[in-house]
Amino acid sequence: MCREDLALNISSCFATFTKPINSKTMGLRRSNGRTSIEVTVKRTDLIKRLKRNRTKHQQEYEQAITLWQEDLAKTIASTDAAKIRQYPENLSELEENCPVSFLDEYDDIIDMFEMGVNDEILLDSEAFRNFCRDEWDWKSDIAGNKYYKTILPKG
């Protein structure tokens, strides 16, 4: 595809988003040269999605922490405390790789939306990625964790 065709495709795609769909359901905002899309979603649908994402994270965390606990038990069982003169390196590695739970973040957001008085919620692009697609900044921490890597789907 040549540059002109690519530019035409991008501009026609952009034009699709800029057509007035319904000012209450979707919109565009430009700030500092960046375009942000905003969408209005039903609060009940958003809460269902957040609860589903929370359940998935809880299952992943429980699997990862179980693996970590097994390694911790093996490490402690194989450690002769009478011979140790400094903090064991293998325990330091376990400490660094202890899986972290982000259930509190889900709970806070779910509580906020459950207490909301509006039936519809306006989300910007970042909030949509977090709440609906379950793409959080902290996901990179999870992806780098030895125990989460073991249980998360490869992809």
Image (cartoon, rainbow, N blue to C red):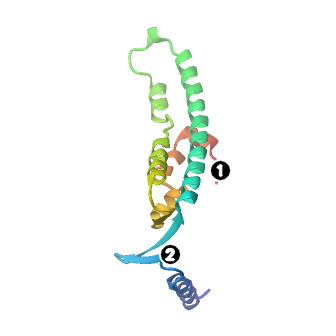
Q: Position of residue 93 (x, y in %)?
A: 47, 31
Amino acid of disc 1: Lys
The numbered disc on residue 26 is 2
Q: Which residue is mark 1?
A: 154
**Residue at 58% across, 50% down:** 53
**Residue 68 occupies which quadrant of the picture?**
top right
Mark 2 or mark 1, which has the lower sequence index? Answer: 2
- Of 155 and 99, nearer the camera is 99
Secondary structure beneath label 2: strand
Query: Which quadrant of the figure contains the C terminus?
Result: bottom right
Tally the numbered discs.
2
Q: Position of residue 135 (x, y in %)?
A: 52, 56
Pair 2/1: label in front: 2
**Residue at 49% across, 57% down:** 130
Position above or below: 72 against 46: above
Badge 1, how many Cα within 10 Å: few under 14, some, many 20+? Answer: few
Query: Which quadrant of the figure contains the N terminus?
Result: bottom right
Left/right placement of residue 114 relative to residue 60 reads: left
- Of 132 and 114, nearer the camera is 114
The numbered disc on residue 80 is none
Secondary structure beneath label 1: loop
Badge 2, how many Cα within 10 Å: few under 14, some, many 20+? Answer: some
Q: Position of residue 120 (x, y in %)?
A: 50, 65
Q: Position of residue 50 (x, y in %)?
A: 55, 52
**Residue 47 occupies which quadrant of the picture?**
bottom right
* Gap between marks 2 and 1 measured at Cα: 34 Å
**Residue at 55% across, 39% down:** 146
Amino acid of disc 2: Met
